[in-house]
Image (cartoon, rainbow, N blue to C red):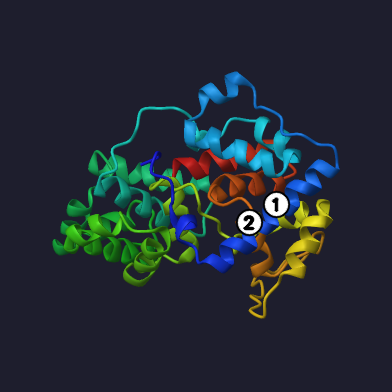
Amino acid sequence: MLNKLATKFNSTNSSTFSLLQRSKAQFTSMKRARNQSAQELPEEFQQRHIEPFNKGCKLILDIDPTLYDLIAKKDFSLFLKKEQTPMTLNHHFSKLASSILAQQISGAAANSIKQKVINRFNEFPTFQEMAKLYVDNRSQELRECGLSARKVLYLESLSNYFNENQDSIEKLLTEDSDEIASQLVANIKGIGPWSANMFLVTSMERMDIFAADDLGVARGCSKYLDSHPEILKDIMSKRGPLIKRSKIKHVKKNWKIYDEDIVEKCGELFTPYRSIFMFLMWRLSETNVEVMEKREDEFVEK
């Protein structure tokens, strides 16, 4: 799956493609004008990570070498070489279920609840076992593990969807990322666009996912654009009539909230490796390194 990178970029309509290519070319020229050159990541760093990730980092550094330190400061757990997890339906079900468990609570609390479920059933239930739990009127057992009533309903929707649509889901998971996200949101209670995008990254391991509506991504892009005024100027000069206002609010007002379409355009500069750039924006958004590392690890474990 990791070697099957998202191909949506190759099918983008010609006008959007040309616009993006012009932007990349201009930013490359700006980079050279600043007498900067892309720096190779340490060999040992590359050896620890999968090849698609290393290839993506090279492209990102060719576009903007100032991101070198942000990449090299710490390994990326999701992209480390490791035994490949079989991409079964139950693997994907477990990832989506974990996403539901983690909603509105801390990572530690979510892990605690998941462990209680595992202890109760000896392992995390498959979607077939979970669906049967509801048929047998045993959903109270999930409540006893610490799940809220709403999350119990969400898990019922998830398990029934997988149990009743196995063949169509198998086919769906071969489609492009937008189609997968759209169908998950439409058919599973409790799965919104953000959860669907995170599923595409952590379970499907797609390399070209970018959640412009994510708080951390928005804050990271704000810092990034503020430190790269030439990029912001170029994006603003090409801004079309369709403006997507950001829904993000913050009280401290210690960083500027850019409209969602601006954040999206920032991410598009790094197609087809926007997932990597998204991780970099999360890193950039967090000033506390220990907190950043903890959040990255919790995200990968979902």
Indicate the quadrant containing the N terminus: top left, top right, bottom left or bottom right.
top left
- In the visual, does 206 lie left or right of 72? left
Res 102 visible: no
State the image coordinates of residue 70 (x, y, percent, origin top left). 70, 37
The one of 175 and 294 positioned closer to us in this rendering: 175
Which residue lies under the disc numbered 2? Answer: 21
Proximity of marks 2 and 1: CB atoms separated by less than 8 Å? yes
State the image coordinates of residue 133 (x, y, percent, origin top left). 19, 57
- In the visual, does 83 lie left or right of 81? left
Q: In which quarter of the image is residue 154?
A: bottom left
State the image coordinates of residue 53 (x, y, percent, origin top left). 52, 36
Residue placed at 68% from the left, 58% from the top? 22
Q: Residue 187 carries which label?
A: none
At mark 2, the secondary structure is: helix
Q: How crowded is mark 2: few (under 14 residues within 10 Å), some or many (20 or more)?
A: few
Disc 2 from disc 1: Cα separation: 6 Å
Q: Relative to 300, does residue 208 appear above or below in the rendering?
A: below
Indicate the quadrant containing the C terminus: top left, top right, bottom left or bottom right.
top left
Extreme residue in the bottom direction: 241
Given the image, on which type of amino acid does mark 1 rest?
Answer: Ala
Given the image, on which type of amino acid does mark 2 rest?
Answer: Gln
- In the visual, does 87 lie left or right of 43? left
Residue placed at 69% from the left, 57% from the top? 23
Q: Which mark is residue 25?
A: 1
Q: Residues within 10 Å of mark 1 (few under 14, many from 20)?
A: some
Residue placed at 74% from the left, 51% from the top? 27
Res 226 visible: yes
Q: Relative to 297, does residue 209 appear above or below in the rendering?
A: below
State the image coordinates of residue 107 (x, y, percent, origin top left). 52, 47
The one of 176 and 126 positioned closer to us in this rendering: 176
Q: Quadrant of residue 75?
A: top right
At mark 1, the secondary structure is: helix
